[in-house]
Image (tube, grey):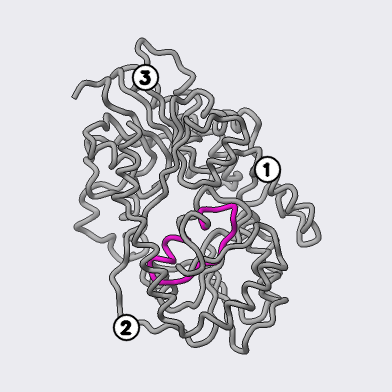
Amino acid sequence: MNSSDQYICAFRGRRDNYQVPLALQEAKRLRLFITDAYAPAWIEKYSVIGSQRLTEKMLSRREASLDDQNVRCLWGTTVLERFRHLAGYPRVETYALLDRNYSLAAAAQARKTRANLFLYSPYAWEAFSASYGHTPNKILFQYHPHWAVEASVLEKDAREFSDLHPSIGAGGAESIASIKSDARARSDDSWKLADHVACASQFTRATLLEAGAKNERISVVPYGVTLPRESDEVERDQVFHVLFVGSGIQRKGLHHLLLAWERARLPAGSVLTLVCRILEPAFVSLIACARNVRLMREVTYAQLAHLYSSATLFAMPSLIEGFGQVYLEALSYGLPVLGTRNTCVPDLGGEIDGVYCNNAGDLDALIDTLERLSKILPGKRDVNRRARLCAAQFSWARFRAGIRSLL
């Protein structure tokens, strides 16, 4: 394959389960995938002694179908990032400082091999604006909404809920306000330099159109999910059991869910389970005062699967999401979902599919929806079946095919 037909892909973490570089490899168009930490092949055969959680974590940093020879890790950047995390630097500041390294590495490889660029939004600006001896095709994957829209949404919410805690919207675990303006430009103005832009939801596309992007240059390629094996061993809880899985941060709307949970008139015995590895200080007191709320900071994959399989409803009233993979993940277990229009939820289906939607930030609507669903969902197996069928429409193979169609 001629280098001019191939692509350099780059991003930190396990974005989209590595499906974009895998799609490029399936099309025989992947020249190199640049990332941070990627597990070696032997991890699939040997467990890390005495630590199932560590083994699971390492396995999540690997895609078995991806050829290891096509993967390059920026270990220096990875170690520095980890050091800054341990030293207590805000994560958003660390990412704003170090994400450019992936873009610079992608530019160097494209220049060396005369390849094209398929880059995720925080890792594209330097590579897209670099000088080359050839004319690379530049495809951008915009996985989050444009920062101007996100900042507006979060700032409005912070003003409305300023009485909760000063940390709401003011430099907490994930605050757009703490990112320097030049980093914002690198991350979210890269679409101006791209030949084509892919995003995972209609909402993300709408924020780019609002920023001035041209409709014909944007394609929506929804994410996929792997359907878990159906099991008759786990029974749905008979009580109204609501599950939240995500970071305990402003953007995820956890404060809205907790306030609605306290004010809603729900059946006796109703329970809310929160799975939050990260939790902003603003929400600690809310959780402590809430009734029938269980907080789980760490869970194994098996524990999370059990929660998805036994709960009544997944609820995450996010203020803004590029997609919200966890909605699709919950549906794959037959668990109905409640989200907002500022996410992928409107793209997934309707109430007939077990997909429920409110306007972002509408606390009264959230209360009403929780009260309504607490009466109609418990014990309704047909809703669980339709939710799983809804998720089945969104396979990773379909996502990869959509990515390949852009090349």
**386 lies left or right of 86:** left
Residue type, mark 1 in image: Ala
Ranked by sequence position, the earlier of labels 1 and 2 is 1
Query: The magenta stretch spans which residues?
Result: 326-345
Estimate how packed mark 2 is, as few (under 14), some (14 to 19) or many (20 or more) residues with alpha carbons within 10 Å.
few
Estimate how packed mark 1 is, as few (under 14), some (14 to 19) or many (20 or more) residues with alpha carbons within 10 Å.
some
Discs 3, 2 touching: Cβ within 8 Å? no
Quarter assignment of residue 219: top left
CA–CA distance between discs 3 and 2?
53 Å
Residue type, mark 3 in image: Pro
Task: Identify which residue is drawn at 55% across, 66% down.
Answer: 356
Task: Identify which residue is drawn at 34% across, 54% down.
Answer: 60
Task: Identify which residue is drawn at 68% across, 43% down.
Answer: 151
CA–CA distance between discs 1 and 2?
45 Å
The residue labelled by disc 2 is 233
Judging from the image, what secondary structure is the residue with disc 1 in?
helix
Is residue 336 located in the magenta-colored stretch of the structure?
Answer: yes
The residue labelled by disc 1 is 151
In the depicted structure, whether residue 136 falls above or below residue 221:
above
Discs 1, 2 touching: Cβ within 8 Å? no
CA–CA distance between discs 1 and 3?
32 Å
Discs 1, 3 touching: Cβ within 8 Å? no
Mark identifier at residue 2: none
Is residue 311 located in the magenta-colored stretch of the structure?
Answer: no
The residue labelled by disc 3 is 136
Q: Residue furthest right?
A: 163
Ranked by sequence position, the earlier of labels 3 and 2 is 3
The count of marks equals 3
Judging from the image, what secondary structure is the residue with disc 3 in?
loop
- Of 387 and 121, which appears nearest the observer? 387
